[in-house]
Amino acid sequence: MTDTIIIGTINGVADMRLNRPKKHNAINSEVMSGLLAAIAQRNPDVIRAAKKLSNDLMTATTKEGLIAESDCSSNLMSATNQIEAVVSHLEHRNRH
């Protein structure tokens, strides 16, 4: 990964940190690219869902947006990839 994104594990939970100590709240293209790459490496379904949700929200009302976000989260949490990740964690299998 890049040195702008630091990936680790805290109590068995993935932890991604933005390494921007001199620039608080500085999100630039390098940081965003690193963050997206780190997420995609762990779960490409999340990137696809985020793109779809982002596009859908362009024309949605607030209510429609909240419903779309809820549906997106539910779909991701019940996806085969996510279920396998949870089972893998519970069985203490090694992850990359």
Image (cartoon, grey):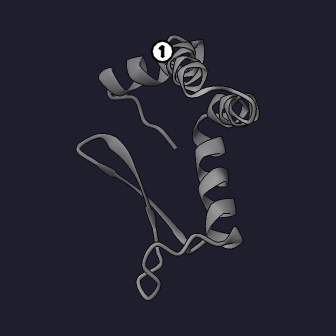
Q: Residue furthest bottom?
A: 22
Which residue is label 1 attached to? Answer: 83
Q: Position of residue 8 (x, y in %)?
A: 39, 56
Asked which quadrant contains residue 33, the reply is bottom right
For residue 14, side relative to residue 70 (left or right) = left
Q: Out of 67 and 38, give the one closest to the viewer.
A: 67
For residue 38, side relative to residue 23 (left or right) = right
**What residue is drawn where x is 74% and y is 36%?**
58
- Local crowd size for mark 1, using a 10 Å CA cut-off: few (<14), some (14–19), many (≥20): few
Asked which quadrant contains residue 14, the reply is top left
Where 33 sits versus 61, above or below? below
Q: Out of 55 and 64, give the one closest to the viewer.
A: 64
Q: Position of residue 91 (x, y in %)?
A: 33, 21
**What residue is drawn where x is 41% and y is 83%?**
21
Dot 1 amino acid type:
Ile
For residue 76, side relative to residue 10 (left or right) = right
Q: Residue furthest front?
A: 61
Where 2 sits versus 79, above or below? below
Asked which quadrant contains residue 39, the reply is top right
Q: Out of 17 and 60, give the one closest to the viewer.
A: 60
Q: Position of residue 96 (x, y in %)?
A: 52, 44
